Image (cartoon, rainbow, N blue to C red):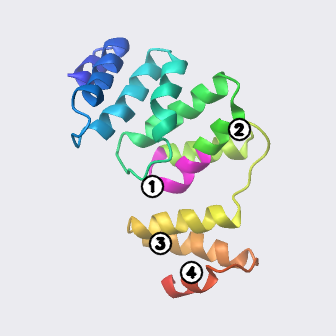
Amino acid sequence: IGEVLLRAGDATAAGAWFESVGEAVPDTLQASRAVWLAGEAWFRAGQCKRVIEQLAPVSKSATLDPAAPAALLSLAECQARENRSNDAQVTLRHLWIKFPAVPESTEAYRRLSHGEHGGHWQPTQEDRFLRGLAMFNQSLLEGAVDELKKYLTAGMKDHRRMEVKLKL
Protein backbone atom coordinates (compact mmCIF):
# COMPACT_ATOMS: atom_id res chain seq x y z
CA ILE A 1 0.00 0.00 0.00
CA GLY A 2 2.81 2.41 0.93
CA GLU A 3 4.64 1.84 -2.35
CA VAL A 4 1.42 2.47 -4.29
CA LEU A 5 0.89 5.71 -2.38
CA LEU A 6 4.48 6.73 -3.06
CA ARG A 7 4.16 6.00 -6.79
CA ALA A 8 0.87 7.88 -6.87
CA GLY A 9 2.63 10.95 -5.50
CA ASP A 10 1.16 10.96 -2.00
CA ALA A 11 4.48 10.88 -0.17
CA THR A 12 3.10 12.07 3.17
CA ALA A 13 0.52 9.28 3.32
CA ALA A 14 3.16 6.77 2.19
CA GLY A 15 5.54 7.90 4.93
CA ALA A 16 2.85 7.55 7.57
CA TRP A 17 1.89 4.12 6.25
CA PHE A 18 5.47 2.85 6.25
CA GLU A 19 5.97 4.12 9.79
CA SER A 20 2.83 2.31 10.90
CA VAL A 21 4.20 -1.04 9.66
CA GLY A 22 7.10 -0.89 12.10
CA GLU A 23 4.83 0.19 14.92
CA ALA A 24 2.10 -2.37 14.24
CA VAL A 25 4.32 -5.37 13.53
CA PRO A 26 7.87 -4.62 14.75
CA ASP A 27 9.02 -8.24 14.45
CA THR A 28 8.11 -8.64 10.80
CA LEU A 29 10.84 -9.15 8.24
CA GLN A 30 9.41 -6.18 6.35
CA ALA A 31 9.96 -3.75 9.25
CA SER A 32 13.48 -2.92 8.13
CA ARG A 33 12.37 -2.26 4.56
CA ALA A 34 9.48 -0.14 5.84
CA VAL A 35 11.91 2.08 7.76
CA TRP A 36 14.01 2.73 4.65
CA LEU A 37 10.95 3.40 2.52
CA ALA A 38 9.45 5.70 5.17
CA GLY A 39 12.62 7.79 5.09
CA GLU A 40 12.47 7.99 1.32
CA ALA A 41 8.78 8.96 1.43
CA TRP A 42 9.41 11.73 3.97
CA PHE A 43 12.23 13.02 1.77
CA ARG A 44 9.89 13.22 -1.21
CA ALA A 45 7.40 15.03 1.02
CA GLY A 46 10.11 17.57 1.85
CA GLN A 47 10.16 16.76 5.57
CA CYS A 48 13.84 16.50 6.38
CA LYS A 49 13.41 16.40 10.14
CA ARG A 50 11.26 13.26 9.77
CA VAL A 51 13.82 11.74 7.39
CA ILE A 52 16.57 12.24 9.95
CA GLU A 53 14.38 10.92 12.80
CA GLN A 54 13.49 7.84 10.77
CA LEU A 55 16.83 6.99 9.17
CA ALA A 56 19.62 8.23 11.42
CA PRO A 57 19.14 5.40 13.96
CA VAL A 58 19.35 2.71 11.26
CA SER A 59 21.81 4.34 8.89
CA LYS A 60 24.72 2.22 10.12
CA SER A 61 22.80 -1.05 10.26
CA ALA A 62 24.10 -4.17 8.58
CA THR A 63 21.14 -4.48 6.25
CA LEU A 64 21.66 -4.65 2.51
CA ASP A 65 18.04 -3.80 1.75
CA PRO A 66 17.59 -2.58 -1.83
CA ALA A 67 15.81 0.53 -0.53
CA ALA A 68 18.73 1.54 1.71
CA PRO A 69 21.04 3.26 -0.83
CA ALA A 70 18.42 5.75 -2.07
CA ALA A 71 17.28 6.37 1.50
CA LEU A 72 20.87 6.99 2.65
CA LEU A 73 21.40 9.48 -0.16
CA SER A 74 18.20 11.24 0.93
CA LEU A 75 19.36 11.19 4.55
CA ALA A 76 22.68 12.82 3.60
CA GLU A 77 20.86 15.50 1.62
CA CYS A 78 18.61 16.26 4.59
CA GLN A 79 21.53 16.32 6.98
CA ALA A 80 23.22 18.86 4.73
CA ARG A 81 20.04 20.97 4.53
CA GLU A 82 19.85 20.95 8.33
CA ASN A 83 23.49 22.19 8.54
CA ARG A 84 24.79 18.84 9.75
CA SER A 85 27.53 18.52 7.14
CA ASN A 86 29.68 16.20 9.28
CA ASP A 87 26.76 13.78 9.59
CA ALA A 88 26.13 14.07 5.84
CA GLN A 89 29.77 13.17 5.14
CA VAL A 90 29.59 10.16 7.45
CA THR A 91 26.38 8.97 5.75
CA LEU A 92 27.81 9.40 2.24
CA ARG A 93 31.03 7.63 3.25
CA HIS A 94 28.98 4.75 4.69
CA LEU A 95 26.95 4.55 1.48
CA TRP A 96 30.08 4.53 -0.70
CA ILE A 97 31.72 1.80 1.39
CA LYS A 98 28.78 -0.50 2.08
CA PHE A 99 26.90 -0.38 -1.24
CA PRO A 100 29.66 -0.34 -3.87
CA ALA A 101 27.61 -1.66 -6.80
CA VAL A 102 24.72 0.81 -6.87
CA PRO A 103 24.44 4.16 -8.69
CA GLU A 104 23.90 5.94 -5.37
CA SER A 105 27.42 4.88 -4.37
CA THR A 106 28.84 6.70 -7.37
CA GLU A 107 26.80 9.78 -6.47
CA ALA A 108 28.01 9.58 -2.86
CA TYR A 109 31.63 9.46 -4.05
CA ARG A 110 31.03 12.42 -6.37
CA ARG A 111 29.53 14.51 -3.57
CA LEU A 112 32.30 13.60 -1.16
CA SER A 113 35.16 14.23 -3.57
CA HIS A 114 33.73 17.57 -4.70
CA GLY A 115 33.39 18.70 -1.11
CA GLU A 116 29.64 19.31 -1.33
CA HIS A 117 29.11 18.48 2.34
CA GLY A 118 32.24 19.79 3.96
CA GLY A 119 35.90 19.73 3.03
CA HIS A 120 37.62 17.85 0.24
CA TRP A 121 37.55 14.09 0.85
CA GLN A 122 39.78 11.26 -0.29
CA PRO A 123 39.21 7.63 0.71
CA THR A 124 41.48 6.53 3.55
CA GLN A 125 43.25 3.21 3.74
CA GLU A 126 40.51 2.11 6.16
CA ASP A 127 37.82 3.14 3.64
CA ARG A 128 39.53 1.12 0.91
CA PHE A 129 39.78 -1.92 3.16
CA LEU A 130 36.11 -1.77 4.21
CA ARG A 131 34.87 -1.16 0.66
CA GLY A 132 37.01 -3.99 -0.69
CA LEU A 133 35.69 -6.28 2.02
CA ALA A 134 32.10 -5.25 1.22
CA MET A 135 32.72 -6.02 -2.45
CA PHE A 136 34.30 -9.34 -1.57
CA ASN A 137 31.31 -10.27 0.63
CA GLN A 138 28.89 -9.29 -2.15
CA SER A 139 30.81 -11.42 -4.69
CA LEU A 140 31.96 -8.37 -6.63
CA LEU A 141 35.37 -9.93 -6.95
CA GLU A 142 36.93 -7.76 -9.67
CA GLY A 143 36.06 -4.58 -7.76
CA ALA A 144 37.19 -6.18 -4.49
CA VAL A 145 40.59 -6.97 -5.98
CA ASP A 146 40.96 -3.38 -7.24
CA GLU A 147 40.03 -1.83 -3.88
CA LEU A 148 42.18 -4.22 -1.87
CA LYS A 149 45.15 -3.57 -4.13
CA LYS A 150 44.67 0.18 -3.56
CA TYR A 151 44.61 -0.59 0.15
CA LEU A 152 47.91 -2.47 -0.08
CA THR A 153 49.63 0.15 -2.25
CA ALA A 154 48.77 2.90 0.24
CA GLY A 155 51.91 1.73 1.99
CA MET A 156 50.72 2.00 5.57
CA LYS A 157 51.29 -1.04 7.72
CA ASP A 158 48.48 -2.37 9.85
CA HIS A 159 47.23 -5.66 11.22
CA ARG A 160 44.95 -6.43 8.24
CA ARG A 161 47.57 -6.55 5.50
CA MET A 162 47.98 -10.32 5.82
CA GLU A 163 44.20 -10.84 5.66
CA VAL A 164 44.06 -8.78 2.48
CA LYS A 165 46.95 -10.70 0.92
CA LEU A 166 45.18 -13.98 1.69
CA LYS A 167 41.96 -12.74 0.06
CA LEU A 168 43.86 -11.73 -3.07
Q: In whole angstroms, how far apart are the C-alphas of marks 3 and 2? A: 31 Å
Dot 4: what SS?
Answer: helix
Picture residue at 71% right of the left edge, 78% below the top: 153
Q: Please tell me whether residue 140 belongs to the stretch shown in magenta.
A: no
Locate residue 159, reporting x and y percent.
65, 80
Q: Mark on residue 164?
A: 4
Dot 1: what SS?
Answer: loop
Q: Please tell me whether residue 98 belongs to the stretch shown in magenta.
A: yes
User: Which is more foreground, mark 3 or mark 2?
Assistant: 2
Q: In whole angstroms, how far apart are the C-alphas of marks 1 and 2? A: 24 Å
The reply to whether the C-beta atoms of the residues labelled 2 and 4 are less than 8 Å apart is no
Q: Amino acid at mark 1?
A: Ala
User: Which is more foreground, mark 1 or mark 2?
Assistant: 2
Is the magenta region chiefly helix, strand or loop? helix
Mark 4 or mark 3, which has the lower sequence index? 3
Residue 146 position (above or below residue 47)? below
Quadrant of the drawing holding the N terminus: top left
| Residue at the right extreme of this rendering | 119
Residue 64 in the figure: left or right of residue 163: left
Q: Mark on residue 86?
A: 2
Q: Which residues are magenta?
A: 92-103
Q: In whole angstroms, how far apart are the C-alphas of marks 2 and 4? A: 30 Å
Mark 3 or mark 1, which has the lower sequence index? 1
Residue 73 in the figure: left or right of residue 64: right
Q: In whole angstroms, how far apart are the C-alphas of marks 4 and 3? A: 14 Å
